[in-house]
Amino acid sequence: MTRALVRIGEFLRMESAAGIILIFAAAFALIASNSPFAAGYASIFETYFTVGFGDGAISKPILLWINDLLMAIFFLLVGLEIKREIMEGALSSVSKATLPVLAAVGGMLGPMLVFLAINQNSPETLSGWAIPAATDIAFALGILLLLGHRAPVELKILLLAIAIIDDLGAITIIALFYTANLDLEPLFYALACLGALIGLNRSRIGSLWPYILVGAVLWVLVLKSGVHATLAGVVTAAFIPLRTPNSSPLHRLEHGLHPWVAFGILPIFALANAGVALSGLQWSALLTPLTLGIAAGLVIGKQVGVFGAIWLAVKTGLARKPEAVSWGQLYGLACLTGVGFTMSLFIGGLAFADPAVMTDVRIGVLTGSLISALSGIAALVLAAKKPVRNSDKNEALGETA
């Protein structure tokens, strides 16, 4: 138990530090996009880079290498985190998982409904319905770190669990609704990779290299098939064993990948995707159905969905409220889940290929995330001034009695 708590603490500290770096990377992208060097900044990510030769060559602009390859590594890490939490962490039992699962489901449905309500008369933008449904773990935990003692550890663990389930929902949405035209031949060969991963897992192979090599081949085949290539990372993670006779391959790979993703891949993604040219923009740009739907989904949909689901779960006895956490702090947490950034921008890129439309997406994501962050900070600062009442403690202990 002590080792698990130490691991959680290390994870939270790294995610929090990564969130702060992510903020600086996003700010740099905004500054670069509105500086005299804006053209040079954009040209870096538009430059084509080719790997391979002949019919097997893969040629993409650097932006897509970041969004397809580097984000596949990010999704590999997300898959490892989901598997670990399900097998031995915050989602390993029904009693532990009930509250974060219900909160995450509410946090996905609320933003979707808000977005669809605002965009119901704009069929050209309806494909962005999933953009405000995502939560950025690193950003949200980075904000909690800045609040120090005002955010108890139980609140951070609950936010982490909600965000991980949120990621699982986003992965499912990408697989089902954001897949291009399928080429079945590469998918047929991808099944052979899947069989190889199953064989490695069943044989309890402890070395990571066989999984990584098969996963790399799987990534190429999935990319060629039209299914989004990042999903190859999740599939690979699902078959890396938690335990083998002599070690834990999953823990080793998660521990090894985490700093590279947190301090490398996510900031690079932010640099490439967060830039918005503000010259010529008018306030009316915030009121287009797409921009407003995303921002309102993140701000209103997340708050109502997450906090409403938690309140209903506790009041009906389906789940227990964390003893050391007040209702005000839970509301602050609900606000912070509206910080969508990384996954929201990623889904936006899948939904819309037009650069002009992506500008609206970026404005909506950045505006909604900023308002959610400030709302969460304000709610948590105010809640920290009020001690958890005895009635709250008794309620948390007795709701499921």
Image: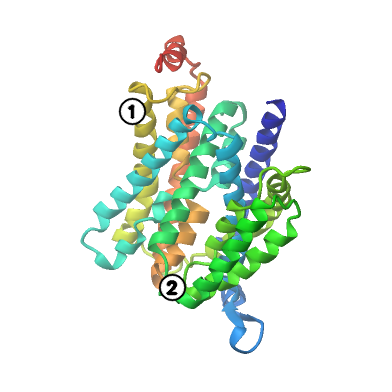
Three-letter residue code for mark 2: Pro
Left or right for 252, reference 160? right
- The image shows residue 304, relative to residue 283, as above or below, that is above
Q: Give the distance between the C-alpha atoms of the residues marked 1 and 2, in whole angstroms.
A: 41 Å
- The image shows residue 320, relative to residue 338, as above or below, that is above
Left or right for 295, reference 15? left
Question: Tag on residue 355?
Answer: 2
Q: In this view of the protein, which residue sits in the foreground, 114 or 30?
A: 114
- The image shows residue 47, relative to residue 231, as above or below, that is below
Three-letter residue code for mark 1: Leu
Q: Position of residue 32 (x, y in %)?
A: 59, 66
Q: Earlier in the sequence, mark 1 or mark 2?
A: 1
Query: Quarter of the image holding residue 183?
Result: bottom left
Dot 1: element: helix
Front label number (1 vs 2): 1
Mark 1 Cα shell of 10 Å, populated few (<14), some (14-19), many (≥20): some
Q: Position of residue 302 (x, y in %)?
A: 39, 42
Q: Which residue is mark 1?
A: 312
Dot 2: element: helix
Q: Could you tell me if residue 31 is visible in this image?
A: no
Q: Residue at x 43, y 15 (%)?
A: 392
Q: Residue at x 35, y 58 (%)?
A: 291
Quarter placement of the C terminus? top left
Q: In this view of the protein, which residue sits in the foreground, 253 or 146?
A: 253
Q: Position of residue 69 (x, y in %)?
A: 60, 67
Quarter placement of the N terminus? top right
Q: Residue at x 50, y 43 (%)?
A: 163
Query: Quarter of the image holding residue 358?
Result: bottom left
Farthest residue to the bottom: give it.
54
Q: In this view of the protein, which residue sits in the foreground, 170 or 377?
A: 170
